[in-house]
Image (cartoon, helix red, strand yellow):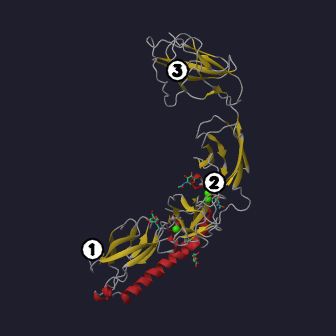
């Protein structure tokens, strides 16, 4: 295929004229070479003077037909009655011969499609058509012209780590040229048209390597490089093609994490559960997420809080133990952040915030009254009369110790009464062991009725058989013996 723009036709004319002269010189040179150096040709005495002819490819129409050589048989004196014939590839079409033995090419050849032709030459008597000598094999070699541009193959995206050493391979580009690779027409050289401060290309192999080890992903994560391929050894007059190749810069961990602030303030309710996340200590690390790997340390002796790295690489501030506003309404401590696997020296230098103060304000929560026990056990002898004291329960408001609590009994079938103010329990009706041996009563303590918070506790009452023995103190139980009653004294 031919590529020659209209404006270059004049220049081509000169080139063709030069090339046509060249093809004759070549034909003669081949003859001399072969006579002197080819042992094969020496062994068989040659009848045909030339066995190789040259024809330029892509000759323009106005130069056709074009003589490419002369058939000469050295054994036959060329007389008026000799004639030449050719047969074989392209014979009597693409190539013709006249009676005088002049060979012509009649149409444009394309070396990139077919680079040589094999034919047979014949010399015979023109009257009798009898062969005068054995046929000779001749070759017509098609001479290359530079009529093909270099073409780049598909180039995948290259990638290289930031800070990669000079000489690290990035990718290799590849261009092909259909012209004869043994000539300048098909010889390609590569050139990097930009990006040369960080990259270089091998002009022969197309391999792109790192030129400067200061590539920094955080500054530029991708480069587009303009690459040129030229034939004719890159000299003026050849063809050039360009392509843009993409180079991704991969991340390494070369940035240390830093807190986004010097002080983090949080408020948290005192009643939050253990492992509750109070908030985030936000961290800045210019690297990609996989290289944002901070480690947090709380300074001093502090087992109340804990900081761990969350999925985003920030610090999650966690409660390790229960909080109590009444005991400690605020906390202040320092947290430091570091990264062990960051390459040295990191990009981020200078005033980076690697320690921050954390201020936690505990918010008071209205907590329900707190019974001294969740379950109260009392044992009383049977037959205790109404209004006799059994014992008492007690609850207090953790928010305001000493403030008023109101007690009540919730269970309907309870043989006890409770003093609303003191929590003292008294017998409501005479206890009869034979009818019921034990009783369960639910009692409540409430802050500021009717809407204050309520807590519950259980009172277990065991009615004992009368005997002469002292009531037995059950482990952990409150045993009440009416002070006014004497031992063994029972009223029926
Ligand atoms: C360049 O591409 C051509 C055609 O696809 C292939 O034959 C050749 O091996 C490639 N060269 C390199 C160095 O990959
Ligand atoms: C190189 O040139 C190409 C094409 O003009 C452009 O897209 C690219 O951004 C340039 N690259 C650099 C590093 O200048
Ligand atoms: C190719 O590169 C080599 C070494 O860098 C240099 O000597 C040579 O002149 C270059 N060739 C061309 C055609 O640019
Ligand atoms: C190159 O980088 C771009 C932009 O970050 C990304 O979309 C693409 O997947 C990367 N390609 C490769 C092969 O790494
Ligand atoms: Ca070419
Ligand atoms: Ca990085
Ligand atoms: Ca990092």
Q: From the viewer's perspective, is 398 left or right of 428?
A: right
Helix, strand, or loop for circle 3? Answer: loop
In this rendering, the answer to whether 313 lies above or below 436 is below
Determine which of the numbered discs, if any, sits on residue 129 in the image. 1
Q: Is residue 136 visible?
A: yes
Determine which of the numbered discs, if any, sits on residue 151 in the image. none
Residue identifier under label 3: 487
Q: Residue sitting at 70 percent across and 62 percent down?
A: 349
Earlier along the polypeptide chain: callout 2 or callout 3? 2
Rendering coords of residue 243 (x, y %): 57, 60
Rendering coords of residue 150 (x, y %): 53, 65
Q: How far apart are marks 2 and 1 (CA)?
A: 109 Å
Q: How far apart are marks 2 and 3 (CA)?
A: 66 Å
The verdict on label 1 being within 8 Å of ligand 5 is no
- Tell me whether circle 1 and circle 3 mark residues in contact (CB < 8 Å): no
Rendering coords of residue 61 (x, y %): 51, 64
Q: Residues within 10 Å of mark 1 (few under 14, many from 20)?
A: few
Residue identifier under label 2: 297
Q: From the viewer's perspective, is 265 left or right of 95?
A: right
Q: From the viewer's perspective, is 81 left or right of 33?
A: left
Q: Nearer the viewer, mark 2 or mark 1?
A: 2
Helix, strand, or loop for circle 1? Answer: loop
């Amino acid at each position: 295929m031919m590529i020659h723009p209209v404006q270059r036709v004049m220049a081509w004319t000169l080139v063709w004229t030069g090339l046509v002269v060249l093809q004759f010189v070549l034909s003669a040179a081949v003859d001399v070479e072969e006579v002197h150096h080819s042992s094969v040709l020496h062994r068989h005495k040659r009848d045909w003077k030339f066995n190789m002819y040259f024809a330029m490819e892509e000759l323009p129409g106005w130069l056709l037909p074009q003589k490419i050589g002369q058939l000469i048989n050295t054994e036959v004196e060329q007389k008026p009655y000799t004639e030449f014939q050719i047969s074989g590839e392209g014979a009597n079409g693409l190539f013709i011969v006249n009676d005088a033995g002049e060979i012509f090419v009649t149409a444009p050849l394309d070396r990139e499609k077919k680079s040589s032709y094999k034919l047979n030459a014949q010399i015979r008597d023109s009257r009798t058509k009898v062969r005068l000598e054995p046929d000779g094999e001749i070759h017509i070699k098609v001479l290359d012209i530079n009529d093909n541009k270099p073409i780049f193959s598909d180039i995948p995206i290259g990638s290289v780590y930031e800070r990669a050493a000079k000489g690290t391979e990035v990718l290799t580009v590849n261009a092909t040229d259909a012209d004869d690779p043994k000539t300048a027409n098909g010889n390609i050289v590569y050139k990097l048209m930009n990006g040369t401060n960080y990259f270089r290309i091998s002009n022969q192999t197309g391999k792109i390597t790192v030129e400067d080890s200061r590539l920094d992903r955080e500054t530029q994560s991708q480069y587009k490089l303009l690459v040129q391929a030229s034939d004719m050894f890159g000299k003026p007059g050849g063809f050039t093609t360009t392509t843009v190749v993409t180079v991704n810069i991969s991340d390494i961990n070369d940035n240390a994490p830093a807190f986004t602030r010097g002080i983090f303030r949080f408020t948290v309710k005192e009643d939050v559960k253990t492992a509750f996340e109070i908030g985030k200590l936000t961290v800045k690390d210019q690297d990609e997420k996989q290289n944002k790997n901070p480690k947090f340390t709380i300074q001093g002796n502090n087992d109340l809080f804990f900081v761990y790295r969350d999925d985003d690489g920030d610090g999650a501030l966690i409660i390790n133990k229960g909080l109590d506003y009444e005991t400690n309404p605020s906390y202040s401590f320092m947290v430091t952040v570091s990264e062990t696997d960051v390459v040295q020296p990191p990009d981020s230098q200078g005033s980076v915030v690697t320690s921050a103060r954390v201020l936690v304000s505990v918010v008071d929560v209205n907590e329900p009254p707190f019974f001294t026990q969740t379950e109260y056990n009392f044992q009383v002898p049977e037959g205790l009369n109404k209004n006799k004291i059994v014992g008492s329960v007690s609850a207090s408001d953790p928010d305001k110790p000493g403030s008023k609590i109101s007690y009540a009994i919730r269970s309907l079938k309870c043989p006890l009464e409770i003093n609303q103010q003191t929590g003292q329990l008294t017998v409501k009706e005479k206890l009869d062991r034979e009818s019921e041996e034990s009783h369960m009563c639910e009692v409540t303590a409430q802050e500021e009725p009717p809407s204050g918070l309520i807590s519950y506790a259980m009172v277990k009452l065991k009615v004992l058989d009368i005997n002469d023995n002292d009531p037995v103190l059950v482990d952990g139980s409150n045993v009440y013996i009416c002070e006014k009653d004497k031992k063994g004294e029972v009223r029926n």
